[in-house]
Image: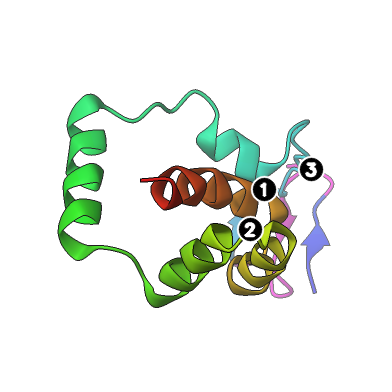
Amino acid sequence: AVVSTQSTGMAASKRGKKRTKPIKQHFPSTPITKQKTEGKKLHACKLQARELVKEISGFAPYELKAIEMLKRDEDKKCKRFLKKRLGRIGVVKRKLDSLTVESRK
């Protein structure tokens, strides 16, 4: 248990040997996930590297299956399939946009 001393205003351990500052609670106004990505843009070299890797490695098996669904005009089924694979609907929408472009080629 932590005992605070009146004279210093600092928290101390039970035996009083280790003095530490009390932890301040900080609740950011925006969620942490937004803070990490906020203002970070990918450099052109990183974008080129990602394109190159995608071109060499090709598509994942689930992406190929989704492209086949899009070619058969099963958009809703494809969206459900991607949601099951990827988890979040925002990621699904981005992936669906990129795969629709590929399915039209």
Mark 3 to mark 2 CA distance (whole Å): 74 Å
Using the image, tell me which numbered label, if any, was put on residue 73: 2
Front residue of 85/105: it is: 105
- Sequence-earlier tag: 3 or 1: 3
- Sequence-earlier tag: 3 or 2: 3
Kindly identify the residue that appears in the image at 26 percent across and 27 percent down: 43
Q: Dot 3, how many residues are within 10 Å of its Cα: few (below 14), some (14-19), or many (20+)?
A: few
Amino acid type shown at disc 1? Gly
Q: Is residue 54 left or right of residue 36?
A: left
Q: Which residue is mark 1?
A: 90
> In the structure shown, which secondary structural element does the residue marked by tag 3 occupy?
loop
> In the structure shown, which secondary structural element does the residue marked by tag 2 occupy?
loop
12 is within the stretch colored magenta? yes
Residue 75: where, in percent of width, then height?
68, 57
Q: Which residue is mark 3?
A: 7
| Residue 11 higher or lower than 31, as above or below | below
